[in-house]
Image: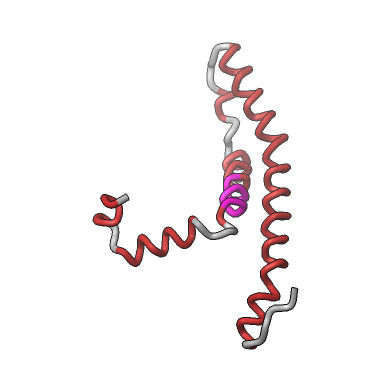
Amino acid sequence: MKTLQNIVTSEYYLAAKKVVTNQYFPAAAVLFGVVLFWTLGLLGGLSLLSANQTLVTTLSWLLFVYVAAVLTPLAGLLAVVDLTRRWLRNRPQREAKRSGGPASA
């Protein structure tokens, strides 16, 4: 960690640390991965099927794509629910900070 701090200036290091330790980061990263997967799929992610591959390679790829196609919408839905839940939970605290009053529970 010391080496990273020497290479990157301290303000960039602190900004990156703040993003990674943010409570929204895990769900946002999952949602980004799901969107990236489907975007790549729409832009020709099944190109392996057009190549001349062995049967085992083709079946393995199809199994991976099938599992990913089933699990990524579920992961995306859970990420959206988690982000929404956290945002709604923290909204009264943000509003209280703006108005200067105590947060209502």
Residue situated in front as seen by the camera: 29 or 39: 29
Figure colour scheme: secondary structure
User: Residue 31 placed where, x, y %?
Assistant: 62, 50
Residue situated in front as seen by the camera: 63 or 75: 75
As displayed, is residue 73 above or below residue 57? below
Q: Quadrant of residue 9?
A: bottom left
User: Residue 102 placed where, x, y %?
Assistant: 67, 82
| Residue at the spot 64% in from the left edge and 29% down from the top edge | 65
Q: Quadrant of residue 38?
A: top right
User: Residue 24 placed where, x, y %?
Assistant: 59, 58
| Residue at the spot 75% in from the left edge and 73% down from the top edge | 105
Q: Residue furthest top?
A: 55
Q: Is residue 78 magenta?
A: no
Question: Which region of the structure is painted magenta?
Answer: 26-33
Magenta segment's dominant SS is helix
As displayed, is residue 8 above or below residue 95? above
| Residue at the spot 57% in from the left edge and 41% down from the top edge | 40
As displayed, is residue 55 above or below residue 90? above
Residue situated in front as seen by the camera: 92 or 19: 92
| Residue at the spot 28% in from the left edge and 52% down from the top edge | 2
As displayed, is residue 93 above or below residue 38? below
Q: Is residue 29 magenta?
A: yes
Q: Is residue 100 left or right of residue 17?
A: right
User: Residue 67 placed where, x, y %?
Assistant: 68, 30
